[in-house]
């Protein structure tokens, strides 16, 4: 685990010194978690005026661990601060247990519920804590989740959050009076705007942090997911507001606006990109968003005494949407292009990187939109769009896929991306694509097939015995070298050929159809011998042809 | 020159260590007897002095120069530089005298002094390297950034002046030593990120004295345009043929256009990114490199143990090893399961090593026929270039890339000198470069990939002269005695032709150079010893031995040489390979270039300077013509490199100062030298001809070390030092523990505080324990 052999790891325990150290640590850990749970229970105990007897009973019922430390807890409510502090310490030692994170979130919400500005969620603190935890274990699901949660929470609850990025010393004045006055409302508004700006800088610094993490481990999919999530958040800050919705002809714009309004839609923030290009998504208004937000926030454990966690009124959400216009379309474009270049550089470093390719596949439609927008010509949009798709597909094939495939044909990552590109560039059946474009698609597919044939030829060279004069070459047997045959190239060639057959069968003459069929079948029969484990699947594919 | 053992000696004032004066010619007592006397502080000798003193030998280490490092030194462009050039002048004088005297005392190598001993004369210091400075504009240069404009102009004038009279020692009066001054490497060397050099440094602890940075890029200056073997991308095909047509006219501008700089595709990522190769070539290259790596894994056996892989194995061992691996391979063939298993597990076990090329884990076994062909070629002693083109069937362009840029072979090859090098003396050398040597060199390069940075190389900070100094320092720690400005003149042998003593030459007017009042004469001194280590340039060369000359041009460029447009990091630490016979250059050997800037601390201070060192070698023949050829090639190469920079538009780059010099190295490698008539106890160390890395120096040092003390460990760390190091490495702090403890104390403290603050009647602490 983590590059350490299990036996090595276990053998450390044989050393009495280290094992005793570990034992004390375990004891301390147990004590802490026990302490944590009791304090929490006490905190949320029904608000009765506890008689002294009950107070005595509570510690007595709890386990003996605390006796070792000689602490008797008072029957009164403990401060949530101490729970926060304990979770922080425990999590920085071990970021994995999700119940600790849950307690931490609970406490954060609880304190913000109390309207104690001093203890409200400080986004930087949460980010610093999770960053520390992720250094310890870069693949801790719960730490990544908490980071996402705190970002979303601080965006959706700007009033409850304190971003200490600069010049936010109005906080002090707010805490003085509890009754909202008119001046304070304007102040609040100012504050939210400042908050948005702060959040934007925070989000952008998050991208840099991701880049650093990915420098250390370029295949950490958690980090890639988080990066997508951050970009989606940035996108959700974007757009120039509902007023300009008349010009939302592009799905990019639509995306931006829809994100902006549905900003508390939890599904968006999990890094799912479903809504990025959802053409049918309707622009929903503030009230709706609030209800959605409530539903989304329902994920967070609620308290026995029924605090309502989601404090955002619909009105408030609306003001946020109004005030957030931090990112223009150009800025969004640059973000998208930066992301695109980022994946390119990561793929250049090591193209055996499924996450980078996956991100790229997600970015492709966005890049496409921004290119179409850049050409700024809206007429004949359908054809233009498809031409742009083909141009992009060709670019991907020539600049990345071809090189990757020829560098290491046994690496399956580029082949998967190849599959994606082939299916992505297919002309949609119902659209009225003009002939040129379809022909271009055909040309590209034939080029792919040619290159793959060439690749297979080079790979086959190994099988040919090199005739050298005066040497006994008979003993190198052929069976062994069979393995060198490239399985993925056959699969790829089959894919390309069958795509050609499927798309253009109506335009081809009989002979070429037959020969292509033969070739595709040849690929499959070869595959059956190379890769007998998936024999049935290949036979099934043969039947398809 | 006549070194009689007159015995009266005075201690040299520059010699800080104790040299006891000796009054009589009597037999030396045990204490004054040195086990080993090492002459010269070049890297090989420095390693040896450290290694031998570790092994308990009493070592005297002397050098005729007044700086450490010999030709491996880092010189200060103000002061030591002058003595370096002064040395060249002395050589010129010596050469002039020699021409007169040469005929009379030609075969006067050894003469009898008395019955019991023979003197074997060594070459005088001035002639050792046969150092010649051909042209230089360093002195009188003003590096001050404010005055650069005028300085450059001056320099350009000076440059043309010297060029017109190149070959002579045209030296401008050194009235203005560089104000702030800077240091530069005479022999810029790199290290493989894993291998002999790094092993030696780490094992000996000498690495503690040194710092390294990674080399940022290894580049190849070669003809532009993809080969005709492009994939069927039609547009590319048309373009390349059109280019060929247009470039038929052999005028200079066309040549300039066709030379371009490419990153050498070494690692998988490099191959993937490379613009130099077509997809098909990429596939072939990858297959070839993985085959080589498999070979490396198989021959190096389980461990990092390089001893069995010593490249200076003699021919018979070579054959044995070839057979051995052949045997194991045959076994693998008869039992395919076993064979597959071993290679696979080897691949996975060494995933960390040479990771830059490793196959995906699910990759099918490579075919054995390629490996068979490789082993057969090694056994048949095919030359490497023949192997590449005929057996591995790589296109000639690709095989040149492999030969020069990856195996880093320095010499010319007959295959590619279409540029019209009529009397190509190095073709025979290319055919001597056997497949085994080539593959070993490749393995060394490939296994060092993916260790540190993007390339396989390390750049020593403050110049590679630091290496020899660091070893000298560690030698001194272990008890070597050091003397500068004393060079040996002869070795005294006893009747059994065994080394008896060494005679250090005296010097007149010591110190007179800087202060006339303080002069002192030092007479010759005989130092008894058992072993003497001399560089090969000190011994009289046998007439049959062909000599090579290493030419070097060190240019200070104003501006950055290599600029990567998507990289904000503009540090210059690059290596450049120019294969022989590159069009227009007519270089017989490959040119190796190292470009560094301030980031390596061996360049003029300031962001805007790059120091480019170009080296090539030629056969030592009737000097002038060959010299001029090499010099021209080097100066042209500088211009080409500047011209072919990736983006010329911003930040111009020009050469503002340069020095070009050459020195002799012997061509005969230690393997094919006959040791028969060499006196016992005299060890000749052979400087590497032309190499980008210092790894060969370590192997050479090891060879001599094992001759002198066959039973000791090379560069072993002393026990107490080792313990210290281990102890130091073991100190770790357990932050988990600290955090947990602080958490525990925290839950006690605030609770208590709170309780106290409430002022309740509840008793705190310990009350419940009972």
Image (cartoon, rainbow, N blue to C red):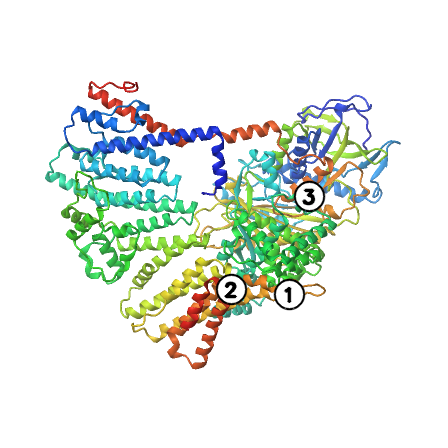
Q: Spatial distance from mark 3 to mark 1, Cα to Cα?
A: 40 Å
Label 2, secondary structure: give it.
helix
The chain that hosts pointer 3 is B
Q: Residues within 10 Å of mark 2 (few under 14, many from 20)?
A: some
Q: Secondary structure at mark 3?
A: loop
User: Is residue B243 visible to the viewer in this orientation of the structure?
Assistant: no
Pointer 3 residue:
B687
Instruction: Give the percent coordinates (x, y) of residue B46.
Output: 66, 35
Per the image, label 1 sits on a secondary structure element best described as loop
Judge left or right: residue B538 versus residue A258: right
In the depicted structure, whether residue B32 falls above or below residue B45: above
Residue B177: quarter of image: top right
Query: Which residue is farthest right?
Result: B115
Q: Position of residue A393 (x, y in %)?
A: 39, 64
- Residue pictured at 38% horizontal, 73% vertical: A502
- Figure check: A492 above or below A153: below
Q: Picture coordinates of residue B264 (x, y %)?
A: 54, 54
* Residue receiving disc 2: A530
On whether disc 1 and disc 2 are found on a single subunit, the reply is yes
Q: To which chain does the residue with label 2 belong?
A: A
Distance, label 1 to label 2, CA atoms, is 23 Å
- Residue at 42% x, 81% y: name it: A509
Marks 3 and 2 sit apart, C-alpha to C-alpha, by 53 Å
């Amino acid at each position: 685990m983590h590059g350490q052999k299990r036996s090595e790891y276990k053998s450390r325990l044989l050393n009495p010194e280290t094992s005793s150290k570990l034992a004390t640590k375990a004891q301390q850990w147990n004590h802490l978690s026990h302490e944590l749970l009791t304090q929490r229970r006490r905190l949320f105990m029904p608000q009765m005026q506890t008689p002294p007897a009950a107070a005595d009973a509570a510690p007595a019922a709890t386990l003996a661990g605390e006796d070792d430390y000689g602490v008797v807890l008072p029957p009164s409510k403990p401060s949530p601060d101490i729970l926060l502090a304990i979770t922080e310490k425990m999590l920085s030692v071990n970021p994995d247990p999700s119940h600790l994170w849950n307690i931490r979130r609970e406490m954060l919400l609880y304190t913000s519920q109390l309207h104690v500005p001093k203890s409200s969620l400080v986004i930087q603190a949460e980010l610093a804590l999770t960053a520390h935890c992720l250094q310890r274990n870069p693949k801790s699901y719960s730490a990544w989740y908490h980071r996402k949660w705190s970002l979303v929470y601080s965006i959706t609850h700007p009033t409850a959050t304190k971003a200490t990025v600069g010049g936010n010393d109005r906080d002090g004045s707010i805490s003085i009076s509890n009754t909202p006055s008119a001046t304070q409302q304007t102040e609040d508004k100012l504050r939210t705007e400042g908050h948005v700006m702060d959040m934007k800088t925070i989000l952008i610094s998050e991208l840099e942090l991701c880049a650093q993490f990915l420098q250390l481990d370029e295949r950490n999919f958690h980090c890639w997911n988080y990066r997508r999530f951050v970009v989606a958040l940035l996108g959700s800050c974007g757009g120039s507001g509902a007023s300009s919705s008349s010009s939302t002809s592009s799905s990019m714009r639509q995306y931006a606006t829809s994100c902006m309004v549905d900003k508390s839609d939890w599904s968006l923030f999990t890094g799912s990109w479903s809504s990025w290009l959802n053409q049918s998504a309707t622009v929903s208004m503030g009230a709706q968003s609030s209800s959605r937000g409530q539903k989304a926030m329902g994920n967070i454990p609620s308290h026995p005494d029924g605090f309502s966690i989601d404090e955002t009124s619909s009105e408030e959400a609306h003001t946020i949407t109004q005030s957030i216009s931090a990112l223009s379309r150009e800025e969004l474009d640059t973000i998208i292009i930066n992301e695109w270049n980022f994946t390119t550089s990561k793929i250049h470093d090591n193209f055996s990187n499924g996450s980078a390719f996956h991100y790229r596949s997600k970015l492709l439609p966005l890049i496409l939109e921004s290119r179409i927008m850049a050409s700024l010509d809206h007429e004949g949009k359908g054809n233009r769009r498809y031409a742009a798709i083909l141009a992009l597909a060709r670019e991907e094939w020539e600049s990345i896929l071809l090189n990757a495939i020829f560098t290491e044909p046994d690496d399956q990552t580029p082949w998967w991306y190849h599959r994606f590109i082939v299916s992505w560039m297919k002309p949609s059946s119902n659209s009225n694509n003009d002939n040129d474009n379809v022909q271009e698609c055909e040309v590209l597919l034939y080029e792919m097939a040619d290159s793959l044939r060439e690749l297979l030829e080079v790979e086959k060279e190994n099988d040919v015995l090199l005739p050298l004069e005066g040497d006994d070459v008979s003993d190198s047997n052929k069976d062994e070298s069979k393995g060198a045959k490239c399985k993925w190239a056959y699969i790829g060639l089959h894919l390309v050929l069958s795509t050609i057959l499927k798309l253009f069968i109506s335009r081809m003459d009989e002979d070429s159809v037959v020969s292509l069929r033969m070739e595709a079948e040849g690929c499959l029969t070869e595959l059956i011998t190379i890769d007998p484990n998936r024999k049935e699947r290949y036979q099934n594919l043969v039947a398809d042809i | 020159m006549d070194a009689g053992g007159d015995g009266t000696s005075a201690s040299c004032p520059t010699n800080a260590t104790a040299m006891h004066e000796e009054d009589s010619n009597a037999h030396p007592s045990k204490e004054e007897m040195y086990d080993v006397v090492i002459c010269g502080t070049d890297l090989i000798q420095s390693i040896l002095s450290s290694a031998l003193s570790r092994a308990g030998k009493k070592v005297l280490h002397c050098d005729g120069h007044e700086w450490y490092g010999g030709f491996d030194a880092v010189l200060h462009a103000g002061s030591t530089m002058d003595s370096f050039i002064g040395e060249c002048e002395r050589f010129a004088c010596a050469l002039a005298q020699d021409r007169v005297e040469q005929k009379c005392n030609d075969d006067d190598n050894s003469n009898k002094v008395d019955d019991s001993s023979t003197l074997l004369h060594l070459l005088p210091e001035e002639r050792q390297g046969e150092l010649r400075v051909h042209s230089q504009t360093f002195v009188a240069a003003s590096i001050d950034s404010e005055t650069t404009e005028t300085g450059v102009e001056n320099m350009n004038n000076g440059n043309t002046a010297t060029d017109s009279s190149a070959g002579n020692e045209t030296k401008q009066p050194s009235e203005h030593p560089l104000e702030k001054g800077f240091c530069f490497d005479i022999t810029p060397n790199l290290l493989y990120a894993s291998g002999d050099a790094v092993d030696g440094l780490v094992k000996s602890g000498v690495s503690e004295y040194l710092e390294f940075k990674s080399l940022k890029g290894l580049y190849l200056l070669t003809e532009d345009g993809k080969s005709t073997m492009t994939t069927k991308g039609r547009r590319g095909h048309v373009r390349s043929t059109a280019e060929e047509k247009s470039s038929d006219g052999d005028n200079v501008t066309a040549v300039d256009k066709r030379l371009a700089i490419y990153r050498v595709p070494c690692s998988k990522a490099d191959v993937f990114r490379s613009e130099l190769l077509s997809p098909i070539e990429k596939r072939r290259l990858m297959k070839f490199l993985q085959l080589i790596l498999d070979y490396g894994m198989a021959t190096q056996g389980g461990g990092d143990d390089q001893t069995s892989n010593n490249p200076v194995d003699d021919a018979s061992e070579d054959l044995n090893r070839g057979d051995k691996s052949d045997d194991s391979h045959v076994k693998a063939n008869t039992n395919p399961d076993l064979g597959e298993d071993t290679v696979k597990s080897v691949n996975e076990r060494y995933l960390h090593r040479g990771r830059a090329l490793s196959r995906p884990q699910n990759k099918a076994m490579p075919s054995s026929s390629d490996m068979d062909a490789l082993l057969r070629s090694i056994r048949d002693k095919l030359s490497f270039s023949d192997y590449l083109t005929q057996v591995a069937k790589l296109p000639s362009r690709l095989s040149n890339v492999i030969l020069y840029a990856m195996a880093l072979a320095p010499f010319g090859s007959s295959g590619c000198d279409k540029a019209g090098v009529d009397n190509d003396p190095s073709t025979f050398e290319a055919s001597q470069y056997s497949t085994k040597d080539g593959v070993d060199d490749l393995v060394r390069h490939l296994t060092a990939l993916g260790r540190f940075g993007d390339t396989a190389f390390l750049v020593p900070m403050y110049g590679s002269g630091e290496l020899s100094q660091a070893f000298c320092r560690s030698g001194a720690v272990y008890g070597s005695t050091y003397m500068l400005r004393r060079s040996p003149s002869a070795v005294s042998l006893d009747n059994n032709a065994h080394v008896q003593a060494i005679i250090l030459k005296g010097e007149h007017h010591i110190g007179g150079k800087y202060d006339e009042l303080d002069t002192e004469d030092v007479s010759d001194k005989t130092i008894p010893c058992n072993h003497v280590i001399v560089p090969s340039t000190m011994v009289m060369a046998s007439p049959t031995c062909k000599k090579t000359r290493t030419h070097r041009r060190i240019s200070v460029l104003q501006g950055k040489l290599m600029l990567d447009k998507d990289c904000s990091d503009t540090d210059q630490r690059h290596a450049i390979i120019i294969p022989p016979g590159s069009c227009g250059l007519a270089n017989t050997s490959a040119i190796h270039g190292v470009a560094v800037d301030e980031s390596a601390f061996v360049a003029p201070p300031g962001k805007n300077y790059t120091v480019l060192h170009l080296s090539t070698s030629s056969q030592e023949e009737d000097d002038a013509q060959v010299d001029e050829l090499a010099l021209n090639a080097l100066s042209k190469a500088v211009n080409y490199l500047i011209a072919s920079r990736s983006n010329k538009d911003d930040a111009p780059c020009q050469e503002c100062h340069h020095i070009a010099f050459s020195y002799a190295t012997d061509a005969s490698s230690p393997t094919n030298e006959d040791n028969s008539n060499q006196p016992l106890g005299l060890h000749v160390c052979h400087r590497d001809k032309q190499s980008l890395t210092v790894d060969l120096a370590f192997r050479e040092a090891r060879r001599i070390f094992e001759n002198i003390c066959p039973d000791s460990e090379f560069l072993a760390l002393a026990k107490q030092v080792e313990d210290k190091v281990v102890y130091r490495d073991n100190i770790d702090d357990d932050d988990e523990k600290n955090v947990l403890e602080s958490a525990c104390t925290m839950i006690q403290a605030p609770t208590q505080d709170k309780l106290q603050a409430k002022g309740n009647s509840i008793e705190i602490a310990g009350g419940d324990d009972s």
